[in-house]
Amino acid sequence: MAKELTMDCEEAIEYVKKNIKPFDKVEMSYNRVFTPGEVINVETCVLKGGRKSCTVMVHLDGDTIHSTVDIDLEEIKYDLIEVRHCPKDGEEVLIAIDTCEEE
């Protein structure tokens, strides 16, 4: 059984930065997109102009033409609905995203 948490989008991004590691399994739901797969990398940086970036590279489950996607959580944070994190070693966590105010 997964540990269930409720966070706003900023808290969820911080959780991803601190807790999601390569080879963990994730399922992200945002807008009308569902992205299940294995994490290849989590990269954070500050881009030109001071814009923050938190990009999760995911190798998608299943057989698709483009089986690896980059998801910049800072770009989709207002559409983020849910993140399921299944660490390689540890307890599964389900994060439900509470409303996040657009800036």
Image (tube, rainbow, N blue to C red):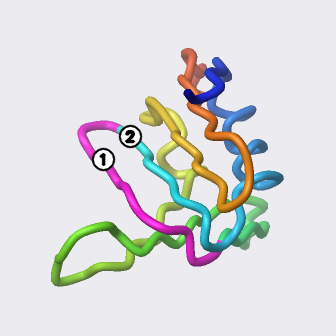
Residue 44 image offset from top left, x and y in percent? 75, 67
Residue 52 in sight here: no
Give the alpha-carbon distance from disc 2 to disc 1, as whole Å. Answer: 5 Å
Q: Are marks 2 and 1 in contact (CB under 8 Å)?
A: yes
Quadrant in which the N terminus appears: top right
Q: Is residue 47 left or right of residue 71?
A: right
Among the two numbered marks 2 and 1 on one chain, the one whose residue lies closer to the N terminus: 2
Residue 58 in sight here: yes
Residue 93's label in the rendered image is none
At mark 1, the secondary structure is strand
Dominant SS type (magenta): strand
Residue 29's label in the rendered image is 2
**What is the three-letter code of the residue carrying label 2?**
Ser
Residue 70 vertical placement versus 27 (above, below): below
Residue 67 image offset from top left, x and y in percent? 29, 79
Q: Give me the residue at 50% from left, 33% from top.
A: 78
**What is the three-letter code of the residue carrying label 1?**
Phe
Q: Which residues are magenta?
A: 31-41
Instruction: Residue 65: say if magenta.
Output: no
Q: Give me the residue at 52% from left, 40% from top.
A: 84
Q: Nearer the viewer, residue 94 or 79?
A: 94
Residue 61 image offset from top left, x and y in percent? 31, 67
The residue wearing badge 1 is 34
At mark 2, the secondary structure is strand
